[in-house]
Amino acid sequence: MGPGEGHGRRPASDHAPTGGSIREPADGAPVPTIVTVKFGLEGTSVAPAGTDKPATGHHHLLIDRDLPPLDQPTSGDIMHFGGGQTEAEVTLEPGAHTLQLLVGDQNNVPHCPPVASDRITITVEQGLPTTSADWGASC
């Protein structure tokens, strides 16, 4: 059995997702301790985990870690968005953090070839406004 075969991993096809991205925050951005991360997926559509439909997937967010093994389901400290979410509020400690998205298929296995965003770095700074209601005081 080849890598991922036992998990239903699909090889790339003409209908495979073509790219993932982090739409917000921007690479290098200073952010508050509670930050909204907005996910992007090009060349396909987002579908909840368990949806067995070609050219679909759902997001996994990696914070301060490398990509996991790409031939098995994601697990551990990877944030899973199996409901098909396209954004999430994340609470982080002050300091520099890396973020990267990885798209999984219906079984939480990364697509083949992998569909992942570039890894970005953000810096969490205390005292930044966390909502638009807080912005007025800092403008």
Image: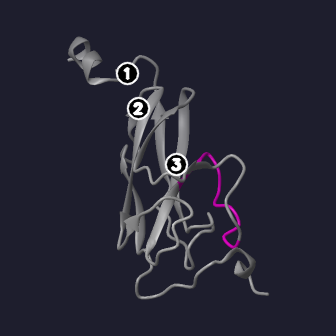
Mark 3 → mark 2, Cα distance in angstroms:
13 Å
Question: Does residue 103 appear to the left or right of 64 in the view shown?
Answer: left
- What residue is shown with label 3? 99
Instruction: Find residue 58 and report its horizontal and vertical position in percent.
Output: 49, 60
**Mark identifier at residue 137:** none
Which mark sits nearer the N-terminus, 1 or 3? 3
Instruction: Find residue 92 and report its horizontal and vertical position in percent.
Output: 55, 31
Type of residue at label 3? Leu
Mark 2 → mark 1, Cα distance in angstroms:
7 Å
Mark 1 surroundings: few (<14), some (14-19) or many (≥20) residues within 10 A: some
The residue at 55%/69% (across/down) is: 105
Q: Is residue 118 above or below residue 32?
A: below
Type of residue at label 2? Val
- Disc 3 is placed on an element classified as strand
Q: Are marks 3 and 2 in contact (CB under 8 Å)?
A: no
For the magenta stretch, what is the residue range? Answer: 60-71
Seen from this angle, which residue lies furthest top? 137
Instruction: Find residue 37 and report its horizontal and vertical position in percent.
Output: 42, 43
Along the line of sight, the residue nearer the viewer: 21 or 87:
87
Which mark sits nearer the N-terminus, 2 or 1? 2
Magenta stretch: helix, strand or loop mostly: loop
- What residue is shown with label 2? 31
Question: Does residue 20 appear to the left or right of 92 in the view shown?
Answer: left
Mark 1 → mark 3, Cα distance in angstroms:
19 Å
**Mark identifier at residue 128:** 1
Quarter occupied by residue 55: bottom left
Along the line of sight, the residue nearer the viewer: 109 or 37:
109
Q: Are marks 2 and 1 in contact (CB under 8 Å)?
A: yes
Q: Is residue 116 above or below residue 94?
A: below
The residue at 40%/59% (across/down) is: 21
